[in-house]
Amino acid sequence: VETSGTQLSGKPVEFSKVDARLLPTVLLIGRPNVGKSALFNRLIRRREALVYNTPNDHVTRDIREGIAKLGDLRFKVLDSAGLEAEASSGSVLERTAEMTANVLRMSNLALFLIDARDGLQPMDLDVGKWLRKHAPGIKIIMVMNKAESLDDGFGSVDAASGEAQILGFGDPIPLSAETGLGMNDLYEVLRPLLEEHMLKNINESVDESNEDCESSEQEDESKLPLQLAFVGRPNVGKSTLLNAILQEDRVLVGPEAGLTRDSVRVEFQYEGRTIYMVDTAGWLQRTKSEKGPGSLSVVQSKKNLMRAHVVALVLDGEEVSKTRKSMTHDEVVIARRSIEEGRGLVIIVNKMDLLKDKLYDRVVKAVPEEIQTIIPQVAGIPVVFVSALEGKGRIDVMEEVIQTYKKWCLRLSTARLNRWLCKVMSRHSWKDLASQPKVKYFTQVKARPPTFVAFVSGKTRLSDTDLRFLTRSLKEDFDMGGIPVRILQRVVP
Ligand code: GDP
Ligand code: GDP
């Protein structure tokens, strides 16, 4: 696939490594029934869609947003079907159009769908006119959906395409949301356009952080409610630990009416902070029925982990001592996945009251060491040894959780980072080698988790060793140990 000249890390842009907030946005638009929802569903596959409700005139119109995956491309996709469903009913037309215009403004590109079987309809012309008026700066790509039936080798695709030219948005891409036909062509057209937009989004977010000054470090995102998930196998003592923690600090709210059992949320205050326990319902229900060496099935799902800012993985200290293994396979999977997904991770070893003297000491020594080998990419993941039954260590648990969250929310100003960069560059031997890439500039593009962009001059990108050095220095110098920190590279002339 041809890519445009500007590139992240000297390779084609790696969409999968970019934070969702920086991904370009594509709006699906077209008259009702052309297949917007069908295309939306194909693009997001089985991933979750966010639904914005826009209640109006007692009618709810939805805009769905999801992360689209098309080959290696990732982008945000908006489905306006819920809006246009009302468009024909006259009185609400205007407001609907206004809402669509707002959504259009949030978008980088629009896919304008028509129906290959119906041919061009008067309403398509209306949509076209409307788009020309409201989307002057936005690239419109024509898509001729339901083309699977036209693929008969008799040139009907060409005929339908020719008709679509009238709209003035260029050649339509024939495809079928239902069968997947033509998705490759869509990919080819979208790739260069999306790449360009994503680089622009990255640059803009870099500019934003350039404008920030030291004071922005005071704006404390760690004051925002913390979503905490206690996960672990049945019987390790999660319920007991939760009760111990909630004992004094409890303001229990929930289960909230109207929510499904899965989304039951426990809310409590800890030292003036709001903490939401996510996932609690899942294991509360199951612990009672699934005693024994059960699995982590409930909490294993990526979706659940992604909801948490900090994952507190509870282990059974007695098991650790008996098996001489810190973690079972399931627990390793959870721990690794939490870090890969950019969550903060705190390991809790419970039931320490059952271990005496040498056994106790051995567990305290072995677990942190073993975790380091299990997750070598993040040094210093906090490990807390507790006895939930005796209420010992519960304060330590909460302190580690909050420390981890604070680090996870850390934001460093560009000025401070570049002062740091000067120092760090002089510490590292590469600086003297003419052939080595140089980091010219360093900036944080986001927090939660902290993500940085290194602007690298030269023809090559930083080696993995260089990157590790930078990451390690960054973590040491700004006390970010124990959390996943990401550094993206951007090669500049
Ligand atoms: P929307 O109103 O634009 O969101 O359209 P929908 O996605 O709801 O689709 C309208 C109808 O067209 C549904 O019955 C779909 O099953 C059908 N449809 C959508 N895409 C295709 C396609 O690629 N081929 C065919 N044959 N039918 C499709
Ligand atoms: P969950 O399934 O992870 O929620 O585990 P529970 O909180 O229901 O605890 C399972 C069993 O372990 C219960 O019998 C608890 O009394 C016991 N337990 C929990 N924490 C401790 C602890 O710190 N020490 C000891 N000795 N037993 C504990």
Image (cartoon, rainbow, N blue to C red):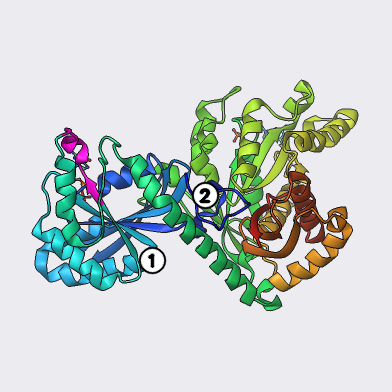
Residues in magenta, as a range: 143-153
Circle 1: element type: loop
**Which callout, 2 or 1, points to the residue nearer the camera?**
2
- Which quarter of the figure has residue 185? top left
* 116 or 271: nearer the viewer: 116
Q: Position of residue 16 (x, y in %)?
A: 53, 46
Q: Is residue 188 toward the left or the right of residue 373 in the image?
A: left
Residue that badge 1 annotates: 106
User: CB at mark 1 closer than 8 A to ligand 1?
Assistant: no
User: Disc number at residue 461?
Assistant: none
Residue that badge 2 annotates: 15
Distance of mark 2 from mark 1, alpha carbons? 19 Å
Q: Position of residue 217 (x, y in %)?
A: 68, 72
Q: Where 484 sits versus 101, above or below?
A: above
Residue 260 showing in the rendered view = yes
On whether residue 148 falls in the magenta region, the answer is yes
* 475 or 278: nearer the viewer: 475
